[in-house]
Image: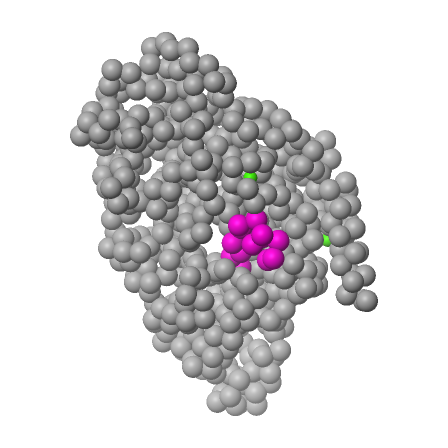
Amino acid sequence: MKKFLSILLCAALAGSCVLAGCGSSGESKPQESTASAASQTQDGKTTADPAEGLTPAASTDKYRNVYQIFTQSFCDSNDDNIGDFQGIISQLDYINDGDPAKGDDLGADALWMTPIMPSDSYHKYNVEDYYNVDKDFGTLEDFDKLVEECHKRGISVILDLVLNHISYKNPLFLDACEEVKQGKLDDKAKYFEFHEPGYYGDDVKTIKVGDYVCEANFSDTMPEWNLGAEETKEEFAKVAKFWLDRGVDGFRLDAIKYFNNKHTDGVAFLKWFVDTCRGIKPDVYLVGEEWSDDAEIVDKYASGIDSLFAFRFAQSSGEIVQSMSMNKGAALIKKFVSYDKKMSEANPEYINAVFLSNHDQVRIANALEGKGVEAEKFAANVYMLVPGNSFTYYGEEIGMTAPATDADKWYRLPMVFDSDNLPKITVDGASGTEAPKFGGVKQQLADENSLLNHYRRLIKVKLSVPAIARGRITGQVSFDDAEVGAYTIEKDSEKLLVIHNFNASAEKTLTITDDMVKNAQVIADFLGSSDAGHLAIKDGKLTMPALSSVVIGSKQ
Ligand code: CA
Ligand code: CA
Ligand code: CA
């Protein structure tokens, strides 16, 4: 009975969420195809949408369009100004309604949630209990419901898992501290990086416990696990099984750069964890945060991990935004080609993980501010058309900006579902979410030319042309124009040509030849405005407007 009541209560709260804080995405009229079926042709441009005949199909493998949410900032179901599981459930139909061919959903088919385990911080990267969820977000029962509702819609669930460090309040660590204070290092202390003072050099941060120190690179409240200890591995195998058995589809592994230390081979540890997870769930998806240069990413790919975030292409200082600023399309593609070559040598099965920003970086709309919605659409084209998995940080698809850039909390403000009904969630004391310049979800769904509808189109095309995500980049295509970036993707016998015009004001007329793609035809175009008509190849020529992208394939 109690259970039944709580389900009723949850349902009521989930319903009120739409009215109270999160706004509604379900009230707007579905915006299906944005094209008219007209066929007026002029200078190789046509108004017929080349993507109109495409049929999106749900993904059943690891290749996904991932949507990242900062768990406490997405949607609050009970007016305590903290986002929660029931809030997320109430908005799942916005992320994906379960029918790839219909609806006004974004279409993303995987969800990465920042940590959900009990913690005294709002971000919860310092875990107090690896076998539970934070009460701010709900109960384990709510979490199970969230997983069930995601799976119903074809959304896989990726949990953020912190294996490098722990909360200093975690009972296992507290017990270890008691022992260490008594000079005992052969029991619980073995789980953590306790050593004699001076064991580490000055470049490694530590905290003092009794006569010993414990490695703590991130914060005094985040001491580090000893990843070289068998005891730790046994514990982590249990943690992985606990969540995978609950239906979780994969993990985003935090801070794996710090898996290496004076006595631990981080790659060997990572390989052990990857193998352990696959032993529990053979099709588990694992993506790691190795925020460093290519050489270290290559090292970590040798572990067999599916994906590592391609940080060099992300954020305002990253190569996508920088290449856009300098119109250097060809140079950027050269970097993507060389990155792909390096990583696929390290792990032939690797799945690239490209993104524009995440919870640790200023929002991408800040980096592109003043360049117009066309620039935000173009940045989306560039990263989402790279083979592999795309990671979209919640709010990126509606152009949310951070109101300040002096602290992480500003990059984590609540999602705006309705700009006439702003959410009240506070983030580490930060509030005052502003309406995005282009409106919230509700407003943008009603606007054919919105950034949100552009993201929806990108995902729809990717779900219709599986080779985009699943193929390999097989080479750069040169048009003797530094402002044009182009590459071929091949998957089995299928060959695609992706072209981006990086110039923000000038169109480009390009010659498409048979050695690029035989019997070339435009499969889909991605333009700054759908009012501009659509692209077609005419007499071997393709004219691309400023900041546009195109996917070309062979005529059947
Ligand atoms: Ca709440
Ligand atoms: Ca749908
Ligand atoms: Ca470490």
User: Can you say whether 393 is above or below 419 in the image?
Assistant: below
Image location (x, y in percent) of residue 114: 56, 55
Boundaries of the magenta span: 147-160
520 and 512: which one is in front? 520
Question: Residue at horizontal 63%, vertical 62%?
Answer: 144
Say which quarter of the image contains residue 29: top right
Image location (x, y in percent) of residue 438: 60, 28
Question: Residue at horizontal 49%, vertical 74%?
Answer: 236
375 and 442: which one is in front? 442
How is the protein colored in the picture?
one colour
- Residue 48 appears left or right of 159: left
- Residue 335 appears left or right of 154: left
Based on the picture, tell me whether residue 158 belongs to the magenta stretch: yes
Based on the picture, tell me whether residue 171 belongs to the magenta stretch: no
Q: Is residue 345 visible?
A: yes
Question: Residue at horizontal 29%, vertical 16%?
Answer: 538
Say which quarter of the image contains residue 256: bottom left
Image location (x, y in percent) of residue 401: 57, 36
Which quadrant of the figure shows ligand 2?
top right
- Residue 460 appears left or right of 302: right
Question: Residue at horizontal 63%, vertical 56%?
Answer: 146
Quarter of the image that includes the C terminus:
top left
396 and 408: which one is in front? 396
Image location (x, y in percent) of residue 325: 39, 29
